[in-house]
Amino acid sequence: DVQLVESGGGLVKPGRSLRLSCTASGFTFDNYDIYWIRQAPGKGLEWVGLVRSKTYGGTTHYAAPLRGRFTISRDNSRNIAYLEMNSLKTEDTGIYYCSRGDMGASYFWGLGTLVTVSS
Amino acid sequence: EIVMTQSPATLSVSPGDRVTLSCRASQSITNNLAWYQQKPGQPPRLLVHGASARATGVPATFVGSGSGTDFTLTISSLQSADFAVYYCQQYHDWPLTFGGGTNVEIK
């Protein structure tokens, strides 16, 4: 079965950094794009960015407001994708999901990891 | 970036009702549109991709339609399990973007 498991969330102070992981199993990891999507408490879904599959050279794309602060990468040997978040702000608080990109849509999702940015 | 606008924000309906949710793109996205359902405390679930193709296991009561800039998701007979928030998402161009969601609640 396809599984995606996010980890690395927690409480962090404004201005600090945090790295989230998305550990995948049940499929050929390097054949698929991996997306990161977040959801602030009580709000809608916000696409954060993605790291493309091996076919597309692992290139990345980001939501414009997050470009420069957030970095997505992948380790195909370990079936893990990462979301590195720097200079965190209180408005970055929320649940962070990773999903598998299937021709653009997200068929499979993890359960998410909660990030709380607060002093 | 492509802006996705959903309407209405909230829909109060009764079980058995027919429901139509709307999603509009700020520019043509051909048929590169997905619909998701999200219930409290759960990740989203893909319902429709390619504007009209149901995902595996999604009942035939969910029908997606549209192309270009205007899309709809119709639920032909609302069941109790269908009360949730619904999001559309375009994957025509980077960055991918979601609509603000429609909350389908019990009247």
Image (cartoon, helix red, strand yellow):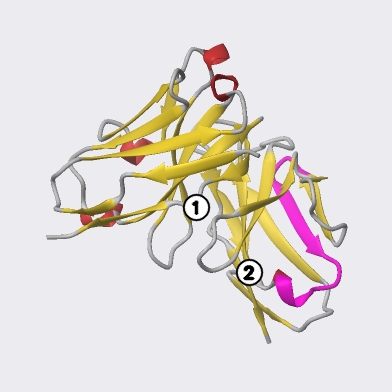
Give the magenta part as a residue range. B67-81
State the residue at coordinates (21%, 51%): A89
Q: Residue furthest bottom?
A: B107
Picture coordinates of residue B38 (x, y %)? 59, 61
The residue wearing badge 2 is B84
Q: Quadrant of residue B6?
A: bottom right
Q: Residue A95 occupies which quadrant of the picture?
A: bottom left
- Specify whether A46 is left or right of A116: right
The answer to whether residue B85 is left or right of residue B48 is left
Q: Nearer the viewer, residue A1 or A42?
A: A1
Q: Is residue B28 left or right of residue A117?
A: right
Residue B33 pos. (x, y %): 68, 42
Whether residue B16 appears in magenta in the rendering, the answer is no
Q: Amino acid at mark 1?
A: Leu
Residue under numbered circle 1: A111
Q: Nearer the viewer, mark 1 or mark 2?
A: 1
Residue found at x 53% / y 58%:
B100
Q: Is residue A32 above or below residue A100?
A: above
On whether residue B80 falls in the magenta region, the answer is yes
The residue type indicated by label 2 comes to Ala
User: Pointer 1 indicates a residue of which chain?
Assistant: A
